[in-house]
Amino acid sequence: MSNEIAKPEKRLTLRRNSRTPAWLSLIWRVGLALALIGVALGGHWLDRDGLRDNVDGNVSFVDVLYFTVITVATVGYGDIVPVTDHARMFDTFVVTPIRLFVWLIFLGTAYDFLLKRVWERWRMSVIQAKLHGHVVIAGFGTSGGEAVRELIRRGTDPASIVVIDPDDDSLRTAAECGTNVVDGDATRNVTLEAVQAARASAIIVSAGRDDTSILIVLTARRVAPDVPISVVIRSGDNEALAKQAGATTVINPASFAGLLLAGSTHGPHIADYMADLANADGRVTLREREATGDEIGKPLAAIKTGLGLRVYRGDACIGFWDSEAGTLRPGDLIVEVVPRREAAKL
């Protein structure tokens, strides 16, 4: 998978087009090549007495133009040749470097306008074919960047993470983590389709602005109707909108920080334990899983993999203290606290 949607094993990159229009860049390169050829032409014309025409003995401007072009093109038929030391030195120390520069311009233009696009299109198709069960991160700001680092700390392969962001510096930082990166707008269907969002295991949205994040959620829900979507929303008023847009989980960083602060006033270790649960480097971690066959019919308190906290049964949220938690049923989702070492094994 890519550090580009152009390193196929690691990285996915669709790079932003240069601010210089393609036609202007092409004209600039052609102009530079013509200017270099013009220097060679001017030098040959001024020193035309150092050339010999083996056909008619007369060196005209057309002859000089012809000789300059075929010399720069490295063709050379021998019908016109430099015969004086001065003309030969000019060809050696001026025309030869010009020839190299013109060829470099030609090859660079061919690469940028043809080979590079074909190559990147092929690499992207290879990457897309390998994208299954990956995590899409829309926005590599403070929250998105920390989400990527936390996923990696929890054992997620960086090659199975795709970061979408329009900022080159953010993409460069994400690529250094080993993730795939896409230079694009996550509010557009084509961008999410390019990263195979419908085949992702999860989508995380952290665009930095609530309106943009909600628009990304709307787009993502349309492209990937069955994929869980988590979104960072900074204003409490917008949390309901994010849910309506299709977000599975809405996270408000300010609210979470408030919980930690409030918890710290009721005991110095409460906030510490809450941070411990949320951090991959903590002693314990939260895990959500489906009830196994041998747990069906037993109480939540009897599970052996960890400490059961909640059961999600359809739309119902059942706490360990509720009577419904006394009998686990098929399809129940269990939220449990497990030791970090055990979580790593699982």
Image (tube, grey):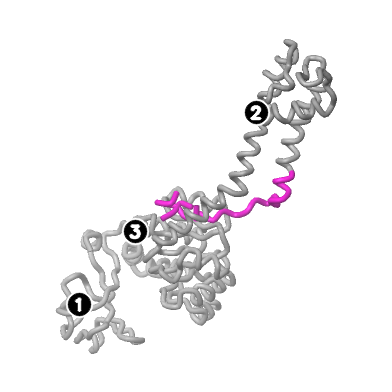
Give SS at disc 3: loop
Q: What residue sits right under mark 1 in the picture?
A: 292
- The disc, 3 or 1, on the residue closer to the chain's N-terminal end is 3
Is residue 317 covered in magenta? no
Question: 191 left or right of 90?
Answer: left
Report the residue at 56% width, 52% height from top.
117
Question: 143 left or right of 154?
Answer: right
Foreground disc of the pair 2, 1: 2
- Residue 216 in percent (x, y) is at 54, 71
Q: What residue sits right under mark 2 in the picture?
A: 74
Picture quadrant where residue 72 is located: top right
- The disc, 2 or 1, on the residue closer to the chain's N-terminal end is 2
* Circle number at residue 156: 3
- The disc, 3 or 2, on the residue closer to the chain's N-terminal end is 2
Mark 3 Cα-neighbour bin, 10 Å: few <14, some 14–19, many ≥20: some
Q: Amino acid at mark 3?
A: Thr
Q: Which residues are magenta?
A: 1-27
Vertical comparison of 21 with 70: above or below: below
Q: Amino acid at mark 2?
A: Thr
Report the residue at 44% width, 71% height from top.
198
Q: Main secondary structure of the magenta part?
A: loop
Pick whichever, 72 or 81, lies toward us.
Answer: 81
Q: Are marks 3 and 1 in contact (CB under 8 Å)?
A: no
Residue at far bottom of view: 323
